[in-house]
Amino acid sequence: MLGKVSFEEAYEIPRLADQSRDQAALYIAPKDLDRYMRQIKSITGERLEVSDANGIGYTIVSLTVPGIQGITDKTEAEKHATEVNNYIANEIKDHRDRLGAFAALSMHDPKQAAAELRRCVKDFGFHGALLNDFQHAGPDGETYLFYDQPAYDDFWKVVVELDVPIYIHPAAPQGNYYKQQYAQRKYLVGPPLSFANGVSLHLLGLITNGVFDRFPSLKVIVGHLGEHIPFDFWRTNHWLEDVEKPLAAKAGDVICKKTIYDYFNHNIYLTTSGHFSTPTLKYVASYLGPSRLLFSVDYPYETIENGCGWWDGDAKNIKEALGGEQAYLDVGRENAKKLFKLGKFHDSDA
């Protein structure tokens, strides 16, 4: 399929790329590390060459993990976010038929984050923001700022006003959290378990703490076919509706007004990034239909060749899983066109 849109696609600014080698080593096989280090720095070179060879027409790039969310000092985080956003805007400005970007934001101060997002959307034409899970803060980095708290309503208000999505992306556990949970099971860090655990907690927090009720048109994206949540849809819904909501009412607490299905069908999009499984895609589509699903790769942690090889190579079965040719095109590019308000891009009508 030509003209695919992909948007969980990472980069690092050149002066910090070598420093990210240790972080990358958590997720990249040793024999593949040199490829990753080369590709994480490429914005308009190898990235576009490989994308073109595999039918990706438009890519939205984002700062790699831990990104700004790993910077505990507020001033430093805000300064680096501005640097990163200015850098990537300049890198893609002559390739806007092929490349877009998500803003990197410091989430220490919700109002400042909203102002930087506004600048990036209005001045650079960015397509929203990607946040690497919660914001680390405090002198020891052990303060975790989650965006499901009322203090972040100032941020979400501007997100809705700008009508752009926010991608909640995983990040590796750090500090005492890593020591207590993963130090003795370090091979579960990342895609095997920790990524899904982190983002699913954050996303379900946004739901249960009423963020989508306060901002009904808010759009949030999560990758990897939902970070395990869809496989617990029935159980989560059963307990929220039949147990947790009555408990909350008894305690005088406010909890989400709708069912988990409502939020996933109206506010949340899921991508195929790093989860190239047709049976899994079919299962998720059976709950949500194709309109909430979006193709993505997770480059360069995953390879474009693998992601597109699955999507194109297993096209017959994927079409059957999604419900036909149009659904296949919708997930591959048409849903992304609508979500990101994309105009013409390379092979957009192929």
Image (spheres, rainbow, N blue to C red):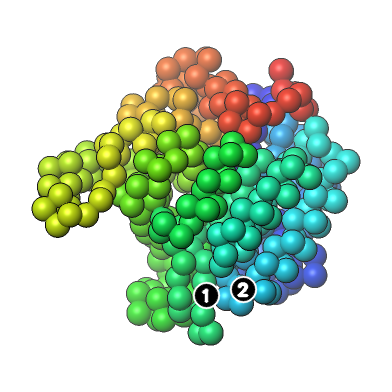
Picture coordinates of residue 329, whole percent (x, y): 57, 21
The kind of secondary structure element at disc 1 is strand
Residue in the image at 53% along x and 33% along y: 294
Residue at image position (80%, 32%) is 97
The residue under label 1 is 137
Tell me the crowding category of disc 2: few under 14, some 14 to 19, or many 20 or more residues within 10 angstroms, Cα based.
some
Q: Is residue 83 visible?
A: yes
Left or right placement of residue 212 versus residue 9 in this view:
left
Kind of residue at disc 2: Lys
> What residue do we see at 80% from left, 56% from top?
86
| Mark 1 nearby-residue class (10 Å; few <14, some 14–19, many ≥20) | many
Task: Locate the N terminus and report the quarter of the image it occupies.
Answer: top right
Can you say whether 158 is above or below 31 in the image?
Answer: above
Q: Position of residue 29 (x, y in %)?
A: 57, 63
Dot 2 falls on a residue whose secondary structure is helix
- Quadrant of the rendered image containing residue 198: bottom left
Identity, as a three-letter code, of the amino acid under mark 1: Ala
Quadrant position of the C terminus in the picture = top right
* Residue extending furthest toward the right: 94
Image-based side of 315 in relation to 342, left or right: left
Q: In the picture provided, is 107 more to the left or to the right than 270?
A: right
| CB within 8 Å, label 1 to label 2 | yes
Q: Residue 74 appears in which quarter of the rendering?
A: bottom right
Q: Earlier in the sequence, mark 1 or mark 2?
A: 2
Q: Is residue 195 visible?
A: no
The location of residue 234, given as percent across then percent down, is 22, 39
Give the image location of residue 3, x and y in percent.
69, 26
Residue found at x 36% / y 37%: 263
Among the 4 quarters of the image, the one containing residue 60: top right
Residue annotated with mark 2: 74
